[in-house]
Amino acid sequence: MKIFERHDNIVLCRQFVVVLVDLAKQSGVHPDKILKGTRCFHQDLDIPNKRISTTELLTIIDNAIRLTKRGDLSFILGRKFFPGQLGSLSQAFLNCKNIAQMLKLCQLFQFKICPFLYINVVKTQGKTHLLFNSAIGEVSNIQQRFLYEFILSAMVGAIKYRLGEIIPIAIKLPYKEVDYIEQYHVNLGNKVSFDQQLAMVSFDDVWLFHEIENCSQSLKNMSLLDARLIRKEQQHPIGFVQAVSQFIESRVTYQDVSLEHCAQYLSISTSTLKRKLAQHQTSYQILLDRIRCQHAIFAMVENQQNNEHIANSLQFNDVTNFRRAFKRWTGMTPTVFKEQATQH
């Protein structure tokens, strides 16, 4: 498994930075000010395959938001992303015959599309849920909002582009309602819930395999062959925090999710694992708590499982300990949380 860290140069400037710099210029902000605090200079943006680190991208995002004072930057970046910023993958997406195929490509080529966030697709009866998590560790509230706004507007825009309409979706976001709420209504629709415990998009299964017209399997196969060759040459990795998170996710129920077992899985020492997570502004306990919390919420609200079943699956000694942990995670007991969830 090849893994990248925050300081590694993996973000393609032409996909993200160039658009942000151009938008800032339109607002009267000089490119050098947007790039301040990074090792990237304005003339570097003319280099076709210039890459920067995710740390530098987050700095550029902070600069752009602070200096332009615009609430639409992330949404414009998302709208421009598909199909223009995906290179050889564009033809593959343009020839997917349904949303299920598009989601599969998003997971297969996550590094090229969105290396800083990853998606888990979870199914319940009649519904599909997309759970979003950070691949690069903890980020500030402003950065988190920006990244979610970008990926959601790109996703909604891609679906509208291919289907010719916006499908009914429900969006949950883990931060408070923003001042520029009109941007959410225009770009994402009206069914957005803020101040939730997770970031999730849900829609009816009927849309998952809704047939998209004017698709060519031959063109799709050709573009995927090109994309796979590029991916093989570049050995596309995943973020270190994503690797740890996915280790926990795959074992969170009924299996050993100890820090020691994770270190062994990654072939590093426990001290190295702790140090690397600290460099990503997080810890093993933070990731473990977040994933356990997400599993508990999903099992409770979407699958209607009781506390005893959830506590047992998450390997708590008893239900009381689970209730205490759940209150620590969410600020509410399971009973109160479920009551509030059913009211939305």
Image (cartoon, rainbow, N blue to C red):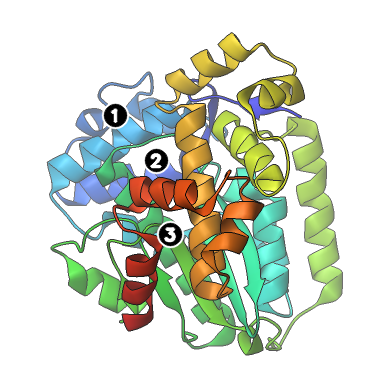
Q: Amino acid at mark 1?
A: Leu
For the C terminus, give its image quadrant: bottom left
Of the residues tagged 3 and 1, which is closer to the observer?
Answer: 3
Q: Which mark is first along the chain, 1 or 3?
A: 1
Q: Amino acid at mark 3?
A: Ala
Which numbered marker is on residue 35? 1
Label 3 crowd (10 A; few <14 / some 14-19 / many >=20): many
- Who is closer to the viewer here, 312 or 223? 312
Which residue in the protein does label 3 denote?
Answer: 199
Q: Which mark is first along the chain, 3 or 2?
A: 2
Q: Are marks 1 and 2 in contact (CB under 8 Å)?
A: yes
Q: Secondary structure at mark 1?
A: loop
Q: CA distance from mark 2 to mark 3?
A: 24 Å
In the displayed structure, does residue 335 sit left or right of residue 73? right
Residue 123, x across and y down, in percent: 66, 72
Q: Is residue 309 above or below residue 282?
A: below
Which residue in the protein does label 2 denote?
Answer: 17
In the displayed structure, does residue 106 sit left or right of residue 215? left
Which numbered marker is on residue 274? none
Q: Which mark is first along the chain, 2 or 1?
A: 2
